[in-house]
Amino acid sequence: MILIADGGSTKCDWILMDSTGEKIFKTRTKGLNPAVFPEIVLEQRIEENPDLREVKDKVERVHFFGAGCGTEKPSKLLAGIIANFFTNADDVMVKEDMVAAVYAATTEPGIVCILGTGSNSCYFDGENIHQAVASLGYILMDEASGNYFGKRLIRDYYYKRMPPELAVKFEEKFDLSSDEIKKNIYQKENPNTYLASFAEFIFANERNGYFYKLVHEGLTDFVHSRVLCYPECRTVPVHFIGTIAYFSEDIIRAVLQPYGIEVGNIVRRPIDALVEHYRKNVLTA
């Protein structure tokens, strides 16, 4: 049996398949970003899932694609944790989430963008992934991501830039006391996930001028920083992966239109497309 996973900082989706590609189960754990979470948290989040515990001695292969797995040290850490948990797995592979995003989006050359808790992009030439800019995470980068929009909402609320009727709804949904916010950002673990939790406010409410402007500015920032840096962006499609992208398709098209850039596939959850990639290209190989 092979277990494939697509993980971010907020959540991680797992799918177990048999050798023919038949899906046995799908389950979810909390986020498993090894560049953000300490080893003990990563271990606990895997161990507390009952579905994974039930098959831990039966899984033969584990292929994990995740945020924070693009450099050697964190990817080795997570690979060791997975190998220690799935003791009979003789094939444990950990790769960055950009690889899964490419598999989910295309088999042809294109720009592939992730817009989730964090954000990133790459150019796929049909065989290899190329990144023009290294990701430095949620404090310095991550334009148009969940944590980017979370920060924007909190700042707009405190600077009274948010429309009053929305500010009332925002107060009803979240604890916006300065002490609570500072505690979560500066004292607790996972500040990026905490900030990203505020972004759902944008997409859970009816679209209006304020939300449109907010998302448009974030996506414009992302395109300038993470799409136009690839000379190929005007000759190949630009694909988008993640919930932020899924709910912002019309704004993505509006932002890209002046540049004559073709919008490719927009995939909300890459794990499902990843399954098809494995059925066609891995399990039949």
Image (spheres, rainbow, N blue to C red):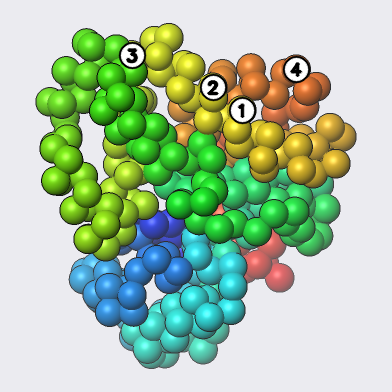
Q: Which of the two discs, 2 and 3, labels the residue nearer the N terminus? A: 3
The residue carrying mark 3 is: 206
Label 1: how many residues lie within 10 Å, few (<14), some (14-19) or many (20+)?
some
Tell whether label 1 touches label 2 (CB within 8 Å).
yes
Name the residue located 39 percent from the left edge and 57 percent from the top edge: 9
Alpha carbon of mark 2 to alpha carbon of mark 3: how far?
A: 16 Å
The disc label shown at residue 216, or none = 2
In the depicted structure, whether residue 181 falls above or below residue 63? above
Depth check, front residue: 115 or 26: 115
- Expressed as whole percent of the image width and height from the top left, the position of residue 91 reads 54, 84
Q: Which of the two discs, 4 and 3, labels the residue nearer the N terminus? A: 3
In the image, 119: left or right of 203? right
In the image, 214: left or right of 102? left
Alpha carbon of mark 1 to alpha carbon of mark 4: how far?
A: 11 Å
The residue carrying mark 1 is: 220
Q: What's the residue type where badge 2 is placed?
A: His
